[in-house]
Image (cartoon, rainbow, N blue to C red):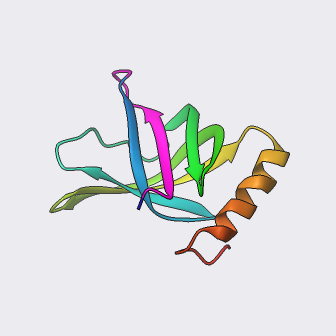
């Protein structure tokens, strides 16, 4: 959808950018194409860029689950931890504006 994306580095140092399937204050969900690297539960990534409704936030991404086996690839669930509380407040506001989320 392009209104919410996450950018992170895979273990080889390659920068990946993926559209989010969903986002809320509890976490986010995104897909990884079949044949691509799949993060594992517990993996954390620093200096991740989360873009929501035109705003960019930098922080740490923690993988909560990664489910493989879908025809098109894998689905990952993650939590994003912004650098500061102020950025967290701004992110919460941006999430409330996101068209497919319930803002929780």
Q: Is residue 95 visible?
A: yes
Q: Give the quadrant of the N terminus.
A: bottom left
Query: Residue at the spot x=23%, y=40% of the render?
Result: 36
Name of the residue lying farthest toward the front: 54
Q: Residue 99 in the image: x percent, y percent?
A: 55, 74
Depth check: 55 or 60 in front?
Answer: 55
Depth check: 29 or 15 in front?
Answer: 15
Q: Is residue 56 magenta?
A: no
Query: Residue at the spot x=61%, y=49% of the render?
Result: 80
Name of the residue lying farthest toward the right: 86
- With respect to residue 99, does 73 lie above or below? above
Q: Residue 19 in the image: x percent, y percent?
A: 41, 54
- The boundaries of the magenta stretch are 2-13
On the image, which quarter does residue 97 sit in? bottom right
Q: Give the quadrant of the C terminus.
A: bottom right
Q: Is residue 25 visible?
A: no
On the image, which quarter does residue 60 sit in? top right
Name of the residue lying farthest toward the bottom: 102
Query: Residue at the spot x=58%, y=60% of the render?
Result: 27
Q: How many marks?
A: 0
Q: Residue 63 in the image: x percent, y percent?
A: 49, 48
- With respect to residue 75, does 9 lie above or below? above
Q: Is residue 7 magenta?
A: yes
């Amino acid at each position: 959808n392009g209104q919410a994306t996450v950018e992170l580095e895979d273990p080889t140092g390659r920068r990946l950018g993926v559209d989010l399937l969903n986002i809320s204050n509890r976490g986010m969900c995104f897909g990884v194409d079949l044949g691509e690297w799949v993060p594992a539960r517990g993996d954390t990534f620093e200096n991740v860029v989360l873009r929501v409704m035109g705003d960019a936030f930098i922080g740490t991404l923690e993988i909560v689950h990664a489910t493989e086996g879908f025809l098109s690839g894998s689905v990952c669930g993650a939590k994003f931890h912004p650098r500061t509380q102020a950025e967290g407040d701004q992110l919460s506001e941006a999430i409330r504006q996101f068209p497919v989320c319930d803002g929780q």
